[in-house]
Image: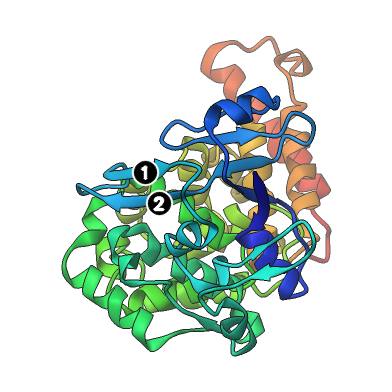
Amino acid sequence: MDVYLVGGAVRDSLLGLSVTENDYVVVGATEQEMLNAGYRTVGKDFPVFLHPETQEEYALARTERKTSPGHTGFVCHASPEVTLEEDLLRRDLTINAIARSDSGELIDPLGGQADIACRSLKHVSSAFIEDPLRVLRVARFYSRFYHLGFTVHSDTTALIVKMVNEGQIAELTAERIHGELNKALHTKDPAAFFDYLRLVGAHEFLWPEITNDDIENLRKVSSTNIPSLQIETCFAGLTMNLDNALLTNLCQRLKCSNSRTETSGLVAKFLAKWVLLSELDAEEIISLLQQTDALRKRARFDAFNAICANISNNKTLPARWCQFLDLIANVRASDIDTGETGPALGKAIRETRIKRVKAAIPVNK
């Protein structure tokens, strides 16, 4: 049994980047031998095991053969006879097909180190076309390593264009698309992800609602060194100019969470007014807080508030909006000593809120 570190951990260490996750391939072992050694199986479609102490993933060396459309249409073959080179050959890009032995020796039969040196994202083999998710993966790696000067090899782009023109993108589920989108939004240059997908023609299949202007908005948002909420901020920045119907359609097609759908919708609708806080009067401030349902859904408003701050790069407004929200939230019916009930009480509460907010607005705003 021989164990090798493979994939992203080897690639990132060669690039001088921090390694956050280790994956291993095991050559010359059976499933039973792994179980006997204390490993716990977690793979459903192919044999993957968790180390009994580190909980890191160890997969038996395997080959794959495409038998039908879709990401489940593969037949995997894992046995002690499968070599390390055969396992590496099934991977997507050469930079992801490098292994390191326990002694530190690099096994690189496909030229991944050379492609790292020349900053090239290049497919391993013609089998690349068997999984359409690789179209998005290449775009995502392009965005992740864009700041390092990586480009996609022309032969790989030609294959991807062929895949797109053949309609293979239609095989992808919303969950797989959304997963790659989230990873891309977490990179240093997420706009490059959309740039490349537009270049190869996949854009119209994936998100026709998104325009070049939207991608430019994302480019600006992602360059502001966002300290938190990066993925949600980038998504909201990308979609902030979409009307409600287009944004809803996009979120439904991608199966976005209710939280993302609602919060990005609030940003699209209210960001322009949110940034003008210093120009709003008390009634307009209360109106925005009510329209965003801030009193009943404080956590959602807090997320909206933070995202607006990131997009506008204004770090002072969130605290002021929270101040006004707290002021109106603290007005209770028991504070209204007029004996009013029903609509009259509601009117009195509103008037009290307006009075408190007005008193908190700087005179020289």
Q: Is residue 243 left or right of residue 298?
A: left
Evaluate whether residue 347 shows in this view: yes
> Quadrant where the C terminus lies?
bottom right
The tag earlier along the polypeptide, 2 or 1, is 2
Instruction: Depth check: give the residue in front, 314 or 191.
Output: 191
Q: Residue at x 81, y 46 (%)?
A: 359
Residues marked 2 and 1 touching at CB (< 8 Å):
yes
**What crowding class fits label 2: few (fewer than 14 Cα within 10 Å), some (14-19), or many (20 or more)?**
many
Q: Residue at x 29, y 66 (%)?
A: 129
Q: Three-letter amino acid code at disc 2?
A: Thr
Task: Look at the numbered disc 2 and give the secondary structure of its residue.
Answer: strand
For residue 76, the mark is 1
Q: Is residue 347 left or right of residue 229?
A: left
Q: Quadrant of residue 287?
A: top right
Residue 236: horizontal and vertical position, in percent?
Answer: 52, 57
Residue 159: horizontal and vertical position, in percent?
Answer: 29, 76
Q: Three-letter amino acid code at disc 1?
A: Cys
For residue 256, the mark is none
Instruction: Depth check: give the residue in front, 202 or 104.
Output: 104
Evaluate whether residue 281 shows in this view: no
The residue where tag 2 is placed is 63
Q: Residue at x 16, y 67 (%)?
A: 166
Residue found farthest to the left: 166
Instruction: Depth check: give the residue in front, 147 or 93.
Output: 93
